[in-house]
Amino acid sequence: MIPGHVHAEAKATSGVQEQYDKFAPTYDVLDGGQAPELFGFDQLRSQLIGEVSGRALEVAVGTGLNLPLYRWKRTAVYGASFENVGVEDLTAIDISQGMLTEAVARVKGSPLLEDKPITLKQANATNLPFADESFDSIVDTFSLCVIEDPTAALREMARVLRPTGTAFLLEHSRSDNRLLAAYQDLTSSAVASSSKGCVWNQDVEYMLKEAGLTPKYLSRHVAGTVVLIKVVKTA
């Protein structure tokens, strides 16, 4: 498939899709601006995505902020020996055509990305158009909070993840601090209204269990309201 080409395979519209079509042109002002950098989100993204390898899927790619962070598998040339790590090919999906348009522009505008095996597809995270056990790695950053049925999306990730694979998640979550968690519960509706629909008090660990995924690494950040998790399928 042509790198950066958008395959419009999801025609069903939803409130989230329509909203993010409108958000797309200015989305990076929020998600890629000074505030995420201040909270260390950029560093966390780099830390997480630097470990992705093999055939990879990114769910809810948005405008493609993560795309420059992938480490690509290097091919031996003229007998040279390179370490056998990194991403072989990347498929990235989003429900929003508008967001994908921005991601395509990012790929085509970057010399580091334009020749990479990247395929962008329009698809719903709760109904992934891929066969079971298709990917070695799955990436999702800050999208479970806006997906209409996040547990269903996690179940789909578990379905398409290979038994030896890993899903890499960076998500907003309910804090492990009781007072802060109570504040999140109290302000959830207001925060969602002012942050493009993000429900910032979801219990991500519980949703993972419901989806058949088990954390093999978990760290909390920003007073416990952001979790970086590497998960595998539950045996």
Image (cartoon, grey):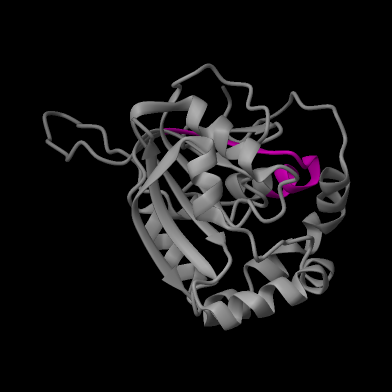
| Left or right relative to 159: residue 87 | left
Q: Nearer the viewer, residue 85 or 1?
A: 85
Task: Identify the residue at image location x=58%, y=46%.
Answer: 107
State the image coordinates of residue 51 (x, y, percent, origin top left).
32, 50
Whether the magenta-drawn stretch holds residue 97 is answered as yes
State the image coordinates of residue 188 (x, y, percent, origin top left).
75, 70
Which stretch did the figure color magenta? 89-102
Quadrant of the rendering where the N terminus is positioned: top right
Residue 66 visible from this viewpoint = no
Task: Identify the residue at image location x=75%, y=45%.
Answer: 148
Task: Identify the residue at image location x=11%, y=29%.
Answer: 79
State the image coordinates of residue 164 (x, y, percent, origin top left).
30, 30
Vertical order, 39 against 20 (above or below): below
Quadrant of the rendering where the C terminus is positioned: top left
Residue 108 visible from this viewpoint = yes
| Left or right relative to 57: residue 9 | right
Q: Quadrant of residue 161?
A: top left
